Image (cartoon, rainbow, N blue to C red):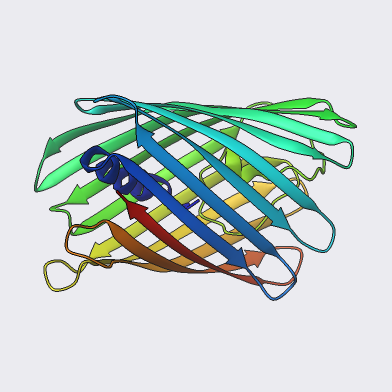
Amino acid sequence: MFRFFLISAIFLFEGSLCCVNYTDFSYFWNKKEYERYSINYLTSISTYFFAGTGYEYYENKEIGESILKLMTSFVRKNFVFSFKPVYFLKEKQTYAYGLKAGVNFGWGKDDFYKNAVFNLNFLNRNGKIDHSDTVGEVGVELNFDDHIFLSARVSCNFTPTPLVSPVDYSSIIGYSYLGYIGYTVYSDVGFGYARSFKPDFNSYLYFSFDRINGYMDDLNSYLIGFKTYLDDEEKYFMDFGYNLADFKKKDNENYYRIMIGVSF
């Protein structure tokens, strides 16, 4: 799903609070036979409780992996508590399951609003591999009058074991890299910037940078994207993203993403 970590979360919950249902579909690709599909659905169970499900499938020359996700959130005043289990369907005698749990806390006034995010994530791999990862994430976003958004985030794997598997870390770590990482991720530091063009255009231009440190390779990820709403009520949107991955041990790669979403 849209991996601009804090800004995406704010957009999602703001849209959900105004509507009963939210759904999006994303397609990722590059020129080296990498493809990824993602679909998500979220609905309001009650005034403060939201639940949904998601499915992802990614493949390249070597692997193909399916992911099932559940999403539950409790929204109360300035807090959003989230609980998101994930399950990787068995592939090549290896399967995995994980959990992303955390809280989003907001405070401030309309002209300067702040958000802080705290997540504790788990990933367990079985089959040929039996290992668990515990990842902590801390992030903050500054919202200047709903026009300028600045964000920073850091993630750390507290129980890393160097290994390679078909399990992608993007399900438990909120980096903005659009590709697939099938080896142990040790840490990640990310920064983001977004600019709204309201009231002239109901659109957003965003940038993000991630430094991802892993077992097989380290990379600098640069993402630029454009999100636009197609109606005045902000029920329909499209999002286009381009990602340059600057690897330290292999050639750079280019990734692309298109997302469409609707609230109803």
Image quarter of residue 196: bottom left
Q: Is residue 125 left or right of residue 83?
A: right
Pick the residue in front: 28 or 248. Answer: 28
Q: Is residue 30 left or right of residue 141?
A: right
Name which residue lies at 24% across and 25% down: 47
Q: Position of residue 73 (x, y in %)?
A: 38, 28
Image quarter of residue 220: bottom right
Question: How many marks on residues?
Answer: 0
Q: Is residue 107 left or right of residue 175?
A: left
**Viewer can see residue 262:** yes
Q: Is residue 232 above or below residue 184?
A: below
Q: Position of residue 216 (x, y in %)?
A: 78, 51
Image quarter of residue 180: bottom right
Pick the residue in front: 150 or 63. Answer: 63
Q: Is residue 147 left or right of residue 63?
A: left
User: Extreme bottom residue here?
Assistant: 31
Pick the residue in front: 129 or 262. Answer: 262
Name which residue lies at 84% across and 35% down: 94
Q: Position of residue 155 (x, y in %)?
A: 53, 38
Name which residue lies at 46% across and 62% down: 259
Q: Position of residue 250 (x, y in %)?
A: 76, 67
Name which residue lies at 34% across and 42% down: 21
**Viewer can see residue 160:** no
